[in-house]
Image (spheres, rainbow, N blue to C red):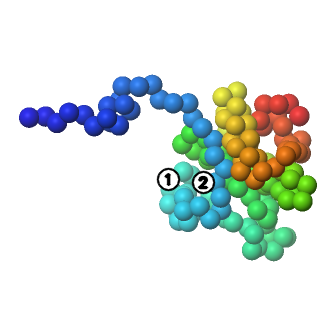
Amino acid sequence: MPRPPLPTLDKITTQAPSPPQAAFIAPLDNLMWDRKSLTWVFDFEYVWEVYKPKEKREYGYYVLPVIYGDRFVARFQPVFDKENKALAIQNWWWEEGVKPDAAMKSALHTCLMDFRAYLQAESVDFGGFGNVFGDGS
């Protein structure tokens, strides 16, 4: 006698997929631990450059990978001024071949606002990268 479908399996096979979301991944997140698997599964190479001498860094001191849906789409360098509760985007790099659309920009903006709330930042300086998030600054 066949078993009834599991609720989760039934849900994912009958409902429309939810829209992709964005997340900033911490350098020490367990997703980032196995660099070979990261490259193999996601075709994404990442090195936490915090311990590299400045002249040997490809990106920056503290750079966070950005995942959207099921792929890494960018990396960026945030700087948080605790005293002034200000978050700044010091740099942003798109991964090769990424063409952000309105949905991606909206998801990135939501992600950034969640990150801002997590840090309890009162302001965000887009540093000329506001177009990444669809605000045009």
Up/down of 13 relative to 41, above or below:
above
Horizontal side of residue 68 vs 128, given as left or right: left
How busy is the neighbourhood of tag 2: few (under 14 within 10 Å), some, or many (20 plus)? some
Q: What element carries label 2?
A: loop
Which amino acid type corresponds to the residue marked 1 in the rendered image? Val
Q: Mark 2 points at which residue?
A: 44
Up/down of 34 relative to 133, above or below:
below
**Front in this rendered view, residue 5 or 58:** 5
> Where residue 115 appears, x then y in whole percent?
72, 48
Q: Can residue 10 be seen in this view?
A: yes
Residue at the left extreme of this rendering: 1
Q: In which quarter of the image is residue 112?
A: top right
**Front in this rendered view, residue 3 or 41:** 3
> Where residue 123 appears, x then y in whole percent?
86, 45
Q: Name the residue under label 1.
A: 41
- Report the residue at 28% width, 37% height from top: 6
Horizontal side of residue 97 vs 86, given as left or right: left
Q: Is residue 101 visible?
A: no
